[in-house]
Amino acid sequence: MPETLEQSAGRFDTVLIANRGEIAVRIQRACRELGLKTVAICSEADRQAPYGKTADSFLCIGPSTAAKSYLNQDAILLAARLAGAGAIHPGYGFLSENAAFADAVEKAGLVFIGPTASSIAIMGDKISAKRAMMAAGVPCVPGPDTALPDDPATIERIALEIGYPVIIKAAGGGGGRGMRVVPKADVLHEAIALTREEARKAFGSRSLYMEKFLEHPRHIEIQVICDDHGNAVWLGHRDCSMQRRHQKVVEEAPAPGIAPDIIQPVGLACVQACLQIGYRGVGTFEFLYEDGAFYFIEMNTRLQVEHPVTEMTSGVDIVQAQIRVAQGHVLDLSQGDVACEGHSFECRINAEDPESFLPSAGVVTHLALPAGPGIRVDTHIHAGYKVSPYYDSLIAKLIVHAPTRAEAMARMREALAGTEVEGISTNIPFLRALFEDGAFAQGETDIHYLEQWLKLRRAA
């Protein structure tokens, strides 16, 4: 007989962390605090990773390239078997939103610390996700909830019905790839052809959809967590509008200037959407916000890089809650228990040139990190650490919390001033300059602001 949810609670005591870098450290800490053993994995390039020394088991699963290591599903499952892990935590990136991997983990008799494969599949396809959100009453960007046809005349009609400018997006896209803005009709078909080919190469599917292009929106996120017992809560909201090439640079919680009576119905609609599709685990609903209105764009079915700002304001350890839900436990908080307080910022510290933003690999020869009340640093690096050219350039996250937004900004300025990384180039000078910007300090920005700010700096 299949086990009940009550019988499955606590059904694993060892977690394999199928990731690297700062998120591997973060997950390992959460597991240890819950009394769970950890299995760390690495590629050849990460053999000296510090979290390998603090894990109960540390296994090298392949060469330096991600395709042969961190994306190698068979190698990860074999490592889990060899180390006796009962669950796999995918972190973010890599295989975290791969429905086939989630299914393979469950079929191997292990627990995938994340949503079910079916939930990942529904929300991973932007068209089916939009359809599910519309059914749950979540506000969406104007545009049909179906894929674009091949017929040019029909595509032209859809664009006219939406109204220019429109944006073309890959149905299986993400990370800022597979999208193109179309300002007017005479470039529509060229944009369609280019985006179809880009989508085919990047995501293995030519499927596209079309939406209204909002010209001055902010990027707002709502964090949710759900258990297998029909309970779900949302943990406040974040503003992730400070982006460069669709990649987030700075995040904050809560989003400034949005009244509770405006955001609350949207948060409750997100919870309702989760209950309708039987969602389990943590997830993030992403919206564009313009002129007082919210428009759903996608849901991330995983832990977010920026989860710390929500942890700092809500007081909820999101990673621990995610693991407990995967164990089958009932959520130990209700919506009435969620009380977000103060303000938090997160800066992504990347190993990259602060002007060109080209990646910078090499050895960290000196490292000084800030400390004090309301300051948190999530990182895996240390003096002597070799930053690899094979992976994402994120090397640390600097997070601050204070009673007000102005105090949090001041605290972040001081924290950035006290952060020193030598031996490689980092974006710290760029972040220091950004936190001196007047419009950012006033919360007068949108998702295009940072790109425009950078153009002005280069022209000066």
Image (cartoon, helix red, strand yellow):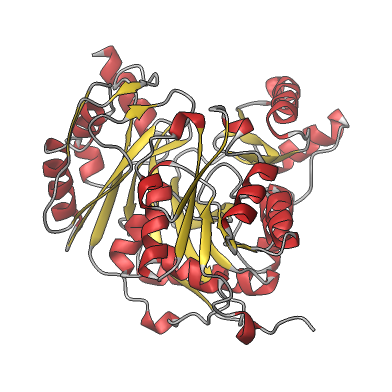
Residue 398, placed above or below residue 449: below
Residue 444: in sight, yes or no? Answer: no
Residue, x 71% and y 64% (percent of image)?
109
Residue 448 at what x, y percent from top left?
42, 34
Please report the residue visible at 66 percent of the width from the left and 37 percent of the height from the top: 169
The residue nearer to you, when weighing 58 against 231, is 58
Left or right: residue 460 compared with residue 168: left
Q: Where is residue 120 in the image (x, y as percent from the top left)?
A: 67, 56
The image quarter containing residue 387 is: top left
Image vertical order of residue 161 relative to residue 87, above or below:
above
Q: In x, y percent, where is residue 188?
A: 71, 25
Residue at 40% over, 61% down? 237
Q: Residue furthest top?
A: 459
Location of the C terminus (image quadrant): top left
Q: What is the quadrant of residue 353 in the picture?
A: top left
Which of the pair 302/294 is nearer the observer? 302
**Is 70 placed left or right of 23 in the picture?**
right
Q: Nearer the viewer, residue 37 or 234?
A: 37
**How many marks do you count on the picture?**
0
Q: Where is residue 21 in the image (x, y as percent from the top left)?
A: 41, 41
